[in-house]
Amino acid sequence: MSGLDLALVREASEDPYIPLVTTVPSPYSEAGGRAFVERRWGRATTGAGYPFVLVDAGGRPVGTVGLWPGAEEVALGCWVVASARGRGAAATGLAAVADWALRELGLPRLALHIEPWNTASVRVAERVGFRREGVREGWLRVGGERRDVLVFALPHRDGRTAARPGGATSRTSRAPGHDRTTGMH
């Protein structure tokens, strides 16, 4: 684990939103930062998820993209620290991971969950090729409160989005006890 990894976690922990929707420790401590990085490595080792670090042209870590298999779908999550936002890291990283997941892992469907107010993330999703499917009410827990999310799916190569498991409609209510924090942030 490098000091660069911990610097990224430290900056993310100071963001008012990232720690609310991820497991980034806040307030930051070196032990908490190390535990966060080690959990992500552990997920990769066990196949419980695929975390990636986004780096800028100078090699500085600026965010993460994660691919998280779930019972209903495979979701992507993304965040970029404030000092690096607006430079394309999220779109570049999200596109690379989505392409890898579809081609190399052969996944049938990828989803993003984005809070409706998060217009920057909506623009990134659309730029990468995700299409809005609908709203999931109360899907995301943010700071102890359940919030609605927009659901975006990456279309198949032929332009159609994959069918949802169980034939769900575009407006789905929250699953009881659901505590998913895989939105794009």
Image: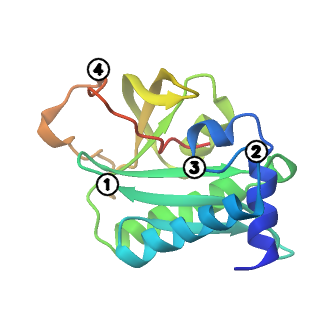
Q: Quadrant of residue 2?
A: bottom right
Query: Which quarter of the figure is the N terminus placed in?
Result: bottom right
Mark nearer the N terminus (4 vs 3): 3
Q: Earlier in the sequence, mark 1 or mark 3?
A: 3
Residue at x 59% of width, y 51% of height: 78
At label 3, the amino acid type is Thr
Question: For the residues marked 4 and 2, what is the alpha-carbon distance in whole angstroms?
Answer: 32 Å
Amino acid type indicated by mark 1? His
Examine the rendered structure and indicate whether residue 130 appears above or below residue 62: above
Q: Badge 1 is on which residue?
A: 156
Residue placed under numbered mark 3 in the picture: 23
Q: Nearer the viewer, mark 4 or mark 2?
A: 2
Are circles 1 and 3 on residues that touch, CB within 8 Å? Answer: no
Hey, what amino acid is under mark 2? Answer: Pro
**Gap in angstroms between the C-alphas marked 4 and 3:** 24 Å
Dots 4, 2 in contact, CB < 8 A: no
Q: Are marks 1 and 4 in contact (CB under 8 Å)?
A: no
Residue 183 image label? none
Element under disc 1: loop
Look at 87% across and 75% down and name the residue there: 58
As helix, strand or loop, the secondary structure at mark 4 comes to loop
Considering only vertical position in the picture, is 44 above or below 133? below
Q: Earlier in the sequence, mark 2 or mark 1?
A: 2
Residue placed under numbered mark 2 in the picture: 27
- Distance (Cα) linking label 2 and label 1: 41 Å
